[in-house]
Image (spheres, rainbow, N blue to C red):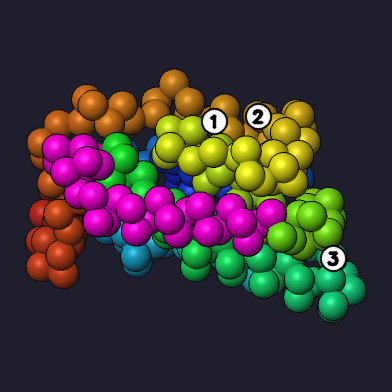
Amino acid sequence: MAIDLYFAPTPNGWKITIMLEECGLPYRIVPVNLGAGDQFTPEFLRISPNNRMPALVDHDAPGGELSIFESGAILLYLAEKSGKFLPRNQRDRCSVYQWLFWQVGGLGPMAGQLSHFVNYAPGGALAHEYSHTRYAGEYDRLFAVMERSLSERECLAGEYSIADMASFPWVLPYKRFGQSMDAYPNVRRWFDTLKTRPALQRGVEVGKDKVTDPAKISEAHRKRMFEQSGASVLAEAEKAKRDA
Ligand SMILES: N[C@@H](CCC(=O)N[C@@H](CS)C(=O)NCC(=O)O)C(=O)O
């Protein structure tokens, strides 16, 4: 198979399975078990030095095998490879760049932190009122930003593009995050329209049966994921190298 996708079933992973399904590019899933520490193995760190998934290896890239980390970079690469979901015209292309970077620098990290306080913080969100309120407010603000854009165009950057594929998986869990769409009719329209796309549906189904239940993660898993520091990730990588 030309493309290997290093993947765990989370919104960041689903951005890429949506795009691969939308483009009809064949791919193989290489599961990354984050709770078990797969992100620290020498093999994985070679392709993803940030010890985060998703990462992709294209064995058929022009000039030889190519590995890429960061979901935004992967989406851009796949759009260029396939010639799809990134307009040719520079003005429209710039619009996609803006919304893609808005997602990877804003919606993703803010929703990710909100998810942390809702799903994983010790004692639950109520035990962390200031932090939870801060990220819930940012998530809500970003819905208002999407609303403004979507009140003037069909999708975030005009036509359906990689910017929508990046954003959709982080809007998908909105109810679980305590967010409402009532004040955002155009976000609702966009969300409901995207949900009907068969390729997008297939994309977010990948690995669904292996989604981690926040209530069931072990103490070792919790520590490995949520108590990272410079020293801890260097120690994890050393240990993984010894075990390899
Ligand atoms: N900026 C990265 C974020 C990726 C990310 O945060 N991935 C998480 C899962 S959603 C991860 O791999 N975590 C591993 C860890 O925390 O050790 C991207 O967009 O690709």
Q: Position of residue 94 (x, y in %)?
A: 76, 75
- Quarter holding residue 1: top right
- Find out whether residue 131 is within the magenta segment: yes
* Residue located 25% across and 42% down the image: 125
Magenta range is 120-147
**What amino acid type is highlighted by mark number 1?**
Val
Circle nearer the N terminus (3, 2): 3
Horizontal side of 216 relative to 18 (left or right) equals: left
- SS label for mark 2: helix
Q: Nearer the viewer, mark 1 or mark 3?
A: 3
Residue placed furthest toward the front: 183
Whether pointer 2 and pointer 1 mark residues with C-beta atoms closer than 8 Å, the reply is yes
* Residue located 59% across and 69% down the image: 101
Horizontal side of 217 relative to 156 (left or right) equals: left
Task: Give the residue pinned by disc 2.
Answer: 202
**137 over 119 or under it: above or below:** below
Q: CA distance from mark 2 to mark 1?
A: 7 Å
Task: Give the residue pinned by disc 1.
Answer: 206
* Residue located 54% across and 30% down the image: 206
- Find out whether residue 139 is within the magenta segment: yes
Residue placed furthest toward the top: 209
Looking at this view, is 211 or 30 the one in front? 211
Task: Give the residue pinned by disc 3.
Answer: 87
Q: Which mark is residue 71?
A: none
Q: Position of residue 243 (x, y in %)?
A: 13, 48
- Quarter holding residue 162: bottom right
Q: CA distance from mark 3 to mark 2?
A: 24 Å
